[in-house]
Amino acid sequence: MHPLGAALAPKPGCALAHARRFLEPPGYKALSGHLAGALRHTRVRLVAKISLHRQHAPAGGGPFALSTLTVGVFLTDQPTHRLRLGGDRARPAPLKAHQGWILPAGAEGFCGFDAPLDYVTVSIAPELLHAAGAPDPTSLRPILGEIDPVILALALQAERFEAGGALYRDSMHQALAAQIVQVTGLKTRAERLDDRRLGRAVAYIRDNLAGDVRIQALAEEAAMSPAHFSRAFRARMGTSPLQFVIAQRLALATALLRESALSVAQIAHRVGYTDVARFGQHFRRQYGATPAAFRKR
């Protein structure tokens, strides 16, 4: 399978049926048979509004047609990589490891490479880009070669977003979409978070510290899109919603450590941590001591 074809929107079903959509996109002939060998190396993960594909492909290539804006990152050097976009002629496009592309929805063409290739593609759903202030994500001018370091770091870490909980995942998704919008010059819109909206969001956080606080829920309290809420919250509070929630959880934890006989694990769960080790790391970073040591002061 060629690296751009992996970004076609997947449908539920077995991996083979999913892969056949990549091998036989509408309007194209099936790719040559040796590409089918890449199927067993394909790993696809869907996380909310971001689709991540980490793959290994043999030397070869083929046509592609992207249904969503896609960030692609090569993990191996490809000095003979070739690329054709739209009706242009194929041209040399050598790429090194951690270089790649950002292509808009609707991009189609052909790519080829003469050595086995490891790569990652991250596809961003249109609604996520709209929320980040991009009225027309298809207007993106293709980017090939060096990738913005923030976009690169977020793309390579995308499969880990889920491990931090819903708020962390949503925050990282919004951060990736916002960075793409900013770096690529897609238009953004400003929106102010007034005292009433901010108060509702903060009240929701404090009432739900023990639960899985989500950016979407906070944005709904403020009657804003998630991306606009995240930017407006940082502008008003000087910190991100995620960091604010962490600070509120740790502040409540200090009170429980001083005033209750609950164990450290019980307190961690009481303030919204499902991972006691993560709670300890955050607590020590904030207060310079472990929860147990803090209790003894």
Image (cartoon, grey):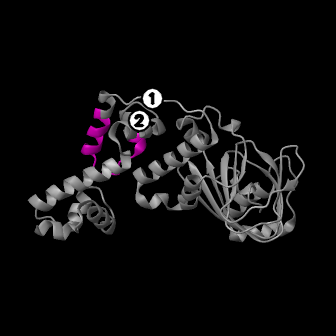
Does any portion of residue 263 appear in the rendered image? no
Does any portion of residue 163 appear in the rendered image? yes
Which circle's residue, 1 or 2, is located before the other in the chain? Answer: 1
Predominant secondary structure in magenta?
helix
120 and 8: which is toward the camera: 120
Marks 1 and 2, how far apart at CA = 7 Å
Residue 137 among those drawn in magenta: no
Q: Residue at x 40, y 37 (%)?
A: 219
Toward the right, the furthest residue is: 89
Quarter of the picture containing the C terminus is bottom left
Quarter of the picture containing the N terminus is bottom right
Q: Residue at x 90, y 49 (%)?
A: 89
Q: Decide: marks 1, 2 in contact (CB < 8 A)? A: yes
Q: Is residue 37 left or right of residue 29?
A: left
| Residue that label 1 marks | 191
> At which x and y percent is residue 53?
64, 60
| Residue that label 2 marks | 232
Residue 43 drawn above or below residue 143 = below
> At which x and y percent is residue 198?
32, 33
